Image (cartoon, rainbow, N blue to C red):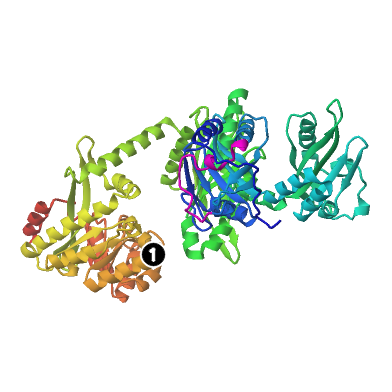
Amino acid sequence: MQAGAVIPDSDPQPPTAETTTSALEALHLPHRFRAWSGSQFEDEDDSDNLWKLALEGSGAGAWDWNLVTGEQIHSQRWQQMLGYEVGEIAHANHEFVSRVHPDDLSTVSTAFTNYLQGRSPSYAADLRLRCKDGSWKWIHTRGTVVSRDAQGQPLRMIGTHTDISERKAAEAALRDSEERWKLALESTGDGVWDWHIATGREYFSKRLVEMYGFTEDELANRPDELDQRTHPDDLAPMQQDRQAHFDGLTPTYSNEHRVQCKDGSWKWVHTRGMVISRDDQGRPLRMIGTHTDITDRKSAEALVRQHAYFDPLTGLPNRRMLRDRLEQEIKRSRRDGLQLAILFIDLDHFKEVNDTLGHDNGDLLLLEAAQRLRQCVRECDTVARMGGDEFTVLLTELAPDTNLEHLLHKLLQTMAQVFQLGQEQVFVSASVGVTLYPADGTEVEALYKNADQALYVAKDAGRNRFSFFTPALQEAALTRARLTNDLRHAMGLQQLQLLYQPIVALANGAVHKAEALLRWQHPERGLISPAAFIPMAETSGLIVPMGDWVFEQAVLQVQAWRRSLAPHFQISINTSPVQFQHSHSPDTNWVRRLAALNLPGDALSIEITEGVLLDSNDSVTAKLLEWRDAGLQVALDDFGTGYSSLSYLLKFDIDFIKIDQSFVRDLQPASSNFTLCKAMVAMAHALGLQVVAEGVETAQQRDLLVQAGCDYAQGYFFARPMTAEALADWVATRT
């Protein structure tokens, strides 16, 4: 018989509407079906794709059943078994059940029910499915639950369909002629066994003996020859299944187990058998069956589990596995009166390593970080990778007097040590958020939220530290959420306004520049500092429309001031790195808007931070070049406080550098700050750049900046930020 042959039924009748409905109710099968093909997986992650491709490679058809939504995915191979091309099978409610032979519906239903009710270790059944041409094909279906909810109810099942038409044909021939069934089974590649129970003799086919690397002379004709080579973990379940068939509890004997080969390796086999002779008391006299090598399928199933529950890079448990373990540990801790700790861990400055040294070195860093975290905790604890540079540690069996701070300090010290990545040495640190069960929460989601809030505080406080969750953190998080929501409506409610701080030419005191500074006048909280709401705007994405609003207000104002104050007046506006990362980053609309107002590009100076240049990509470079071509000027803000790579000044078209107020604040004659200021000014002038000093508050600071050759200055010594009307009046009083 050729591979893929179809077994005709003696009197096959397609299922009626009544039998289909009845079977659907019995099986609790899903109400929606859809198809996927080898290169197209809908709504699935890469690990799901990988296991399905692995199963497809083994020749089996795959299915994936969401028990919550009722959605079931069938692979391309699954459909081709029945003679269909992808997409030919309609996504009807009872599509699968309608193809099951009526005589097999109860078998499938029983197997499914026994599995879900714990009477069987897995879901497995042989059934006939109707093909496109109306013929019937024997299929072996098997599956397992891979995800459950907190109450242990199944959420998702995955499994395979294997074409067993040849085996079924061989088994049919068995009933007609012993010689014919032996030849047929041998032709399928399965090993055949024939057990004469009454005499204690068992005969093995040549194929079965060779399957395990033996010759026919090396195995005695006794049933214990294979039993004693069965894996210890599999022996008892195998004997239990065999006894169930002896006792008439199952129509056939079926079991999957490992058998040790001659070379010491283990081979997975599926053994099937049937008692064909019994005595008058119903005791078995003779049993025949097969061994099928399923090692490849078991390897594919192991791959399914590996990618469903473990991170492919580090081998650590992934988010799904961590959740399962946390749910189990919560139950155990509730019973035993112990506490748990959940640690959310972020690697500080990991992105810089990825960007500067490449993703391969980034992966090496993650592998080393995972190893260090494992070394910091006990065997009973769990270290998981949540994605990116985010790790989670679950500490279990904690007594009330456990010194967690000692462990946390050890963890921080371990992560702060140098990472040797090939020829490169890298230093990173870790930020850790900590929450406790049951003190901080008793549900998984609450504990995750608490740990995340604590991590936020640790990072916001300067990184390389840990923070415990407190109710105050929860209140702060709620406040941030409320403010973010208020911020979404602030522009429409005209709560945002621009203030302007004059920028003074140090050579002659002229004021032809000003910096636009955003303020938020909250109706209940009063004036909110940009330091408070700009990070929220960046996190929420509101910074993009907010930046466009600032631009529009600034260009209208500079147009007016060029008519009333000075023909070359310039306004500086601040931008956020997030605006450049967004798909709608500052673009040619700004340039077009200037042209529409008949304003030259130098009417605006765009202030960027070193973070923009540090994270720069081709789009950032192209944007800066576009602004240069349009005449817009660019200022590098807070110069000297970050990485301050001189390569930025050479690579990008920068017009101004702004000396940060931290250098100006303690400016004294003969001080190191004065020396640094003079050096920065000299360097900038040598590169053709102009210099603006921020935070000037005293006459001495102004005079020292003049001595250093600084071009411009701004600060409270000259004027505080003010409204547009006030600035116009202020300039008028100086002329």
- Report the number of discs: 1
The percent position of residue 16, horizontal first and vertical second, equals: 52, 37
| Residue shown at 71% from the left, 46% from the top | 168
**Closest to the observer: 689 or 189?**
189
Q: Where the C terminus falls, by quadrant? A: bottom left
- Would you name the residue on which mark 1 appears? 616
The type of residue carrying mark 1 is: Ser
**Closest to the observer: 280 or 653?**
280
Q: Where the N terminus falls, by quadrant? A: bottom right
685 shown above or below 283 = below
The percent position of residue 588, horizontal first and vertical second, equals: 24, 65
SS class, disc 1: loop
Q: Quadrant of residue 701?
A: bottom left
The percent position of residue 702, horizontal first and vertical second, equals: 23, 61
**Closest to the observer: 501 or 508?**
501
In the picture, measured across the screen, residue 388 lies left or right of residue 596, that is: right
124 shown above or below 692 = above
Report the magenta residues as a range. Answer: 84-104
Is 100 a magenta residue?
yes
